Image (cartoon, rainbow, N blue to C red):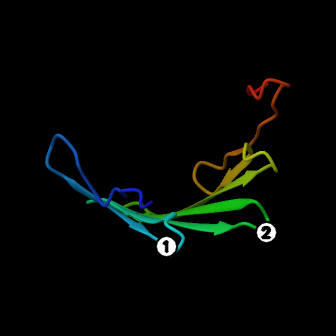
């Protein structure tokens, strides 16, 4: 069974956003009128990298996941943030 995939979104102002997928049907790029976001998945390290290039320059954000698929760490060069997340036994952010 094939699932439909989203390839374009048009916002209320008429701006078009394109979604590009890799061979595994995971989002690889999001293109907007002001920026392009590229996602790189490193399954061995349970990390996804989001690289954004736009009018204000380039920035990269890394999202690290645990073996349950939960975000446990977010690091990036925008604004100097580094966040760590922990979860309770009900999978809520603690």
Identify the secondary structure beneath mark 1.
loop
Q: Nearer the viewer, residue 20 or 30?
A: 20
Residue that label 1 marks: 22
Question: Splitting the image into 4 quarters, where does residue 48 fall?
Answer: bottom right
Question: How far from the left and from the top, in percent, is residue 57?
Answer: 44, 65
Q: Residue at x 50, y 76 (%)?
A: 23
Q: Residues within 10 Å of mark 2 (few under 14, many from 20)?
A: few
Image quarter (top left, top right, bottom left or bottom right) of the N terminus: bottom left
Q: Residue at x 79, y 69 (%)?
A: 44
Q: Is residue 14 left or right of residue 55?
A: left
Question: How far from the left and from the top, in percent, is residue 2?
Answer: 42, 61
Image quarter (top left, top right, bottom left or bottom right) of the C terminus: top right
Question: How far from the left and from the top, in percent, is residue 37?
Answer: 45, 63
Q: Is residue 7 left or right of residue 71?
A: left
Q: Nearer the viewer, residue 22 or 14?
A: 22
Eyeballing the image, is 43 above or below 87?
Answer: below
Q: In this view, which residue lies farthest toward the bottom?
A: 23
Question: How far from the left and from the top, in percent, is residue 42?
Answer: 70, 68
For the residues marked 2 and 1, what is the alpha-carbon distance in whole angstroms?
A: 17 Å
Q: Nearer the viewer, residue 53 or 67?
A: 67
Eyeballing the image, is 48 above or below 14?
Answer: below
Q: Residue at x 79, y 65 (%)?
A: 45
Q: Residues within 10 Å of mark 1 (few under 14, many from 20)?
A: few
Residue that label 2 marks: 44
Mark 2 or mark 1, which has the lower sequence index? 1
């Amino acid at each position: 069974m094939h699932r439909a995939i989203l390839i374009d979104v048009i916002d209320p102002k008429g701006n078009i956003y394109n979604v590009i997928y890799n061979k595994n049907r995971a989002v690889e790029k999001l293109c907007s009128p002001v920026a392009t976001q590229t996602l790189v998945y490193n399954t061995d390290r349970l990390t996804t990298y989001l690289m954004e290039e736009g009018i204000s320059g380039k920035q990269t954000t890394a999202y690290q996941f645990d073996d349950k698929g939960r975000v446990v760490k977010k690091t990036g060069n925008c604004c100097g943030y580094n966040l760590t997340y922990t979860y309770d036994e009900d999978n809520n952010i603690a």
